[in-house]
Every structure is written in C-alpha cells, then in structure tokens.
Amino acid sequence: MKELSVEEQIYLCKYHDIDKHLNFTTGLNQEEIKEVIYKLKQNGLYDQYRKLSEDEYENIIKKEKRKSKYEKILDKYNFDNTKKAYNNLKEVLEVSDSYRSCEELSLEKVFRKIAEKQNIKSYIINNDCKRILDSTYLANRANFEENKYYKKPTVREFVIQELKLQNTKLINHISKENLCESKEKSNEIKENVICDITTDNIKDIDNTFVKVSVKTIMEWSYQKGYLDRMLEENKKIGV
C-alpha cells in the first residue's frame, strides 16, 4: 500500500465522505482507504485531523513541507523531537544516505563523523540512537509493525530499511540465478524445436516463413556441407 503523507492523511479524514474521487486524489483503492481510516481512528488521529480548521490545516501543510526527508521518517514513528537523541538519529540517517548499499554502510564512520562535529566520543552517538530507537519502538510498536518491523530493530536495520539501501550481493545472486534459468529455458526450447522438426513434417512447412539467425543458417550450412561430402565419399568407396 502507498504510504500517505500527513497532508494526505488529514485530507482523507476531513473529506473522505465528500470527495467522490479519492482513488485519484490519494492513489488508494476503496479497501485501502477504509483500512487507513480504520487505523487512524484506532490511534486517535482521525478525530484530531477531522476537527482541524482550514487555517490549522494550512499551517500543518506548510510545516510539513519545510521538514526534511529524515524528519519525516522519524515523525512517521512518533520519535520525540524534543530530545537531543532525535537530532543525532536524524543526522545518522542524513549521513548514511550517502552510502549506495548496505554492504558499504559503516555506522562506525557515521558515528565518528557526527561525534567529531560535536567534539564528543562516537559511542555517545551510538548510545543515543540506540536508546531513542528502543524507547520509541516500545511506545509505538504498532507503527513499526505497520511498516514491516516484526521485532525491535537495531540502529543499522532501521537505517537500512528507512533509506532503502539495497543488498547488492543478494541482487547479484538473484540476477545470476535468473540468467542461468533463462539459459536453461532457452536450451530447452532449442532442443524441443530440433526434435519437433522431422523429415515427416518438413513438407507441411515448405511455404512457411520463419525468422532464423544468420549464425544458425551458417552453422546448418556447414554441417549440411560436411554431411554431403561424407555421403559422396561413402558412395565412391561403396559403403
């Protein structure tokens, strides 16, 4: 299901019974819209969003647009932005976003870089991030489970999932498997085609045009010429 922004969630709560084209407005189908509204009612946000005045609605939208990508990630799980650890975890996300894959990601280097700016030890950044992540998970477990965290994540797991860093080793392994599978299927098809074409059914396809690669034609011509020479030589010696 598409992840809705705060602005979209507010719009859905305020106008779901007015807007008859919500599937175009939100990008969700009717069942998904019902599911989102149900969840918002369960966590108490539905009534809050529903009662917002137009001015309050506009102010929230403006505030949301000023937020960075990393603030939006943390706000999704209700991290307490009044704590210093919030800023540290936000900066960990920001610095880690420069890595292209999870194999390249080095949280030790990330912690060290942030710690040097603050003139503190890197383990303090590590501890801050771990502590706020653990406490937020315990207080907002449902939010994490909705986003496919089925156990308390480590800082590394959280960073990788939220920044969508890819496992290149796994991707390469899958690509190789798919390539091998494609080659096997291709060879199987070639074998079936060769077996299906016999002297009995060639006469049925005399007037049929098929696409054949130049390489295949040359290989066939070479083999045919070789066989013809063998037959001629056998005739000469009376075999």
Image (cartoon, rainbow, N blue to C red):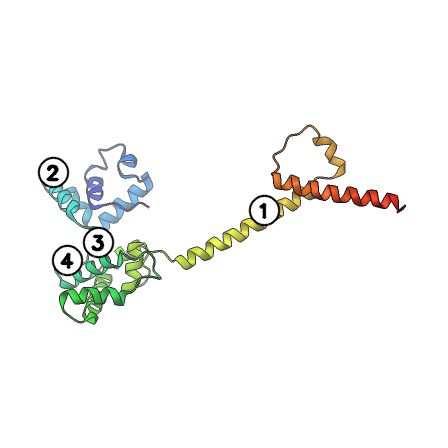
Q: Which residue is mark 1?
A: 186
Which quadrant holds residue 172? Answer: bottom left
Side of 156 where 217 appears, left or right: right
* Amino acid type assigned to the residue bearing label 3 in the image: Tyr
Please tell me how crowded label 4 is: few (under 14), some (14-19), or many (20+) other residues with Cα within 10 Å: few
The three-letter code of the residue at mark 2 reads: Glu
Q: Are marks 3 and 1 in contact (CB under 8 Å)?
A: no
Q: Secondary structure at mark 2?
A: helix
**For discs 3 and 1, the disc positioned in front in the rendered view:** 1
Distance, label 2 to label 1, CA atoms, is 62 Å
What secondary structure is found at the residue carrying circle 1? helix
Q: Secondary structure at mark 4?
A: loop
The Cα atoms of the two marked residues, 3 and 1, are separated by: 46 Å
Dot 4 amino acid type = Asn
Q: Is residue 5 above or below residue 156?
A: above
- Mark 1 vs mark 4, CA separation in Å: 56 Å
Q: Which residue is mark 2?
A: 54
Q: Image check: 238 left or right of 108? A: right
Can residue 9 be seen at all in this image of the molecule?
A: yes
